[in-house]
Amino acid sequence: MTPAGIDGIGSHPPSPIGIIAGRGLFPHLLLDQLTITGRSAVVAGLKGQFVERSGGSTPLDQRVFPLGALGALARYFTDRGVEHCILAGGVDWRTARSTLKLDRHAWSLLPQLLGTGDNRLLTAIAEKLARLGVSAIDAKPFVGPMLVGPGQHAGPPIGNGLRTTVRLAWNGALALGQKDRGQAAIAFGDRLVGLETRAGTDALIARAPGPGAVLAKIVKPGQDTRFDMPTIGPTTVRLGAAVGLSAIAVEADGVLLLQRDQVIDLCHRHGISLISMTKRACDWLGSGATTCSGISSS
């Protein structure tokens, strides 16, 4: 499905795309990509998470909503002709409680969601929004430039010495993702030392034990890619450099590189190897084979 084809065919101008915007760079970069493709956007920012955009040559239709105000958010979109929306950006659950304001639509979801993972939670929210007239769609048709294929993109080659650490971090992220509990893990030497929580990847990196650690970040197995697309950006690399990360391994064609050129430049500057791998190419991670896209055998 192409970006221009989401609303069907014909001579009518496409309806605007809604963005439910959380924290971080991704909502703003997605907005830029929509502009490049000629699509207008309506932004519903999450209070305490989204930083409203100011300036620009064209006024932006944006409003901030409390977390849990599903009915008001859906009306805001439908009143402006929005039929499809994209969920972009994260939520810092450590601060989110102070901005929660659950309406009757959000309250109705609680009994089925207590104790569940993010993927199930976001799927239920999307189903509720669809009943309110707004369908969540995958961002991938709009963010192709932020995705990278398999290979090594920055830093020194990864040899046998670091291969075991990459394997452990990757397997840790996969196991965590299968439980719908997170997308990232950190390994150090021959030990898995950290798993991502709802505090996010930045908090995980801050717990890294020191030089030689490896961060792996993947798409959860079976994840609905309309939600919670994993990302790394310049902040990821700067935090990694501060704790001495040796490598960052991401899933090819799944993890978004925000401000890609800057990410690659920072990895080169700090000597951090940046590699992208597919789950299929890395079946060897649990079997002891000796080759993988982006990892040398020397």
Image (spheres, rainbow, N blue to C red):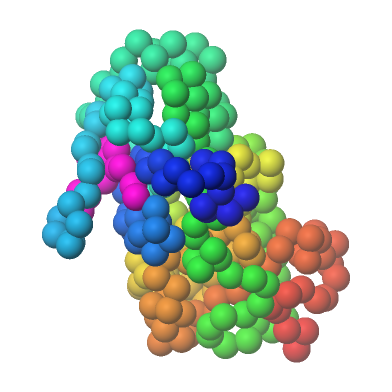
Q: Magenta span has 263? A: no
Residue 278 falls in image quadrant: bottom right
Asked whether the viewer can see residue 289, the reply is yes
What number of labels is visible? 0
Residue at 22% x, 49% y: name it. Answer: 60
Where's residue 134, x and y in %?
44, 29
Residue at 38% x, 35% y: name it. Answer: 82
Outermost residue, front side: 11
Q: Say if 102 sits above or below 134 in the image.
A: above
Q: Magenta span has 48? A: yes
Q: Is residue 70 left or right of residue 160?
A: left
Q: Is residue 205 left or right of residue 225?
A: left
Q: Nearer the viewer, residue 198 or 245?
A: 198
Outermost residue, left side: 55
Residue 9 falls in image quadrant: top right
Query: Which segment is the magenta one?
Result: 40-53
Q: Nearer the viewer, residue 22 or 30?
A: 30
Q: Is residue 130 left or right of residue 18?
A: right
Residue at 54% x, 15% y: name it. Answer: 112
Where's residue 18, x and y in %?
38, 40
Asked whether the viewer can see residue 176, the reply is no
Where's residue 74, x and y in %?
35, 26
Residue at 31% x, 24% y: name it. Answer: 75
